[in-house]
Amino acid sequence: MGFFDILSSVGKSLISAAEEKSQEIMSETWLKMNTFDTQRLNSLIKAKGPTSILAKIALMKLYSRSRYDFTEYMMNDETKSALIRFCKSNTVQLYDKRYSNEILRIANEIIDQYS
């Protein structure tokens, strides 16, 4: 095994570990947001900025709770494109942890409706 083969396998391991950690964080965040009402989700989105990862997860949760509030955020093109990119990302589409069915269903509905 040459130097570049070792370097390649280390790089792949790092990417895999990063994706695993992202999915773990998504699971924990999704679970915590189950207790949030729409007002608290809206406050979080406004405080973090609608293009942060935490806000994107909150937007997905808001989609499942209040389509009216969610639609207001989708009027902003930057927010809309950032959320659609997030919903199409490997982190979401290849998600296989807790709540995967619910998260994937919501992500695909957002993609279908807003792409």
Image: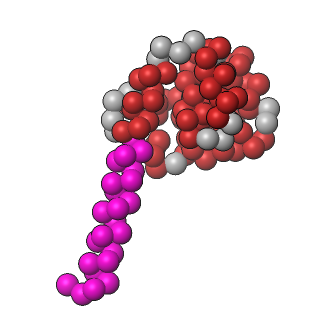
Vertical order, 8 against 64 (above or below) = below
Can residue 107 be found in the magenta stretch?
Answer: no
Is residue 8 at least partly visible in the picture?
Answer: yes
Looking at the rendered structure, the number of numbered marks drawn on it comes to 0
Task: Using residue 74 as the reference point, say whether residue 30 is left or right of it.
Answer: left
Q: Position of residue 15 (x, y in %)?
A: 38, 60
Q: Residue at x 44, y 22 (%)?
A: 32
Vertical order, 89 against 13 (above or below) = above
Q: Residue at x 71, y 19 (%)?
A: 69
Q: Residue at x 39, y 30 (%)?
A: 28
- Numbered range of the magenta stretch: 1-23
Task: Characterize the magenta stretch by its predominant secondary structure.
Answer: helix
Task: Using residue 47 as the reference point, say whether residue 8 is left or right of it.
Answer: left
Is residue 111 at least partly visible in the picture?
Answer: no
Front residue (pair 32, 111) = 32
Q: Which colour assignment does the render follow?
A: secondary structure
Q: Residue at x 72, y 17 (%)?
A: 68
Q: Position of residue 14 (x, y in %)?
A: 35, 62
Task: Using residue 111 as the reference point, say whether residue 13 is left or right of it.
Answer: left
Task: Using residue 17 as the reference point, say whether residue 49 is left or right of it.
Answer: right
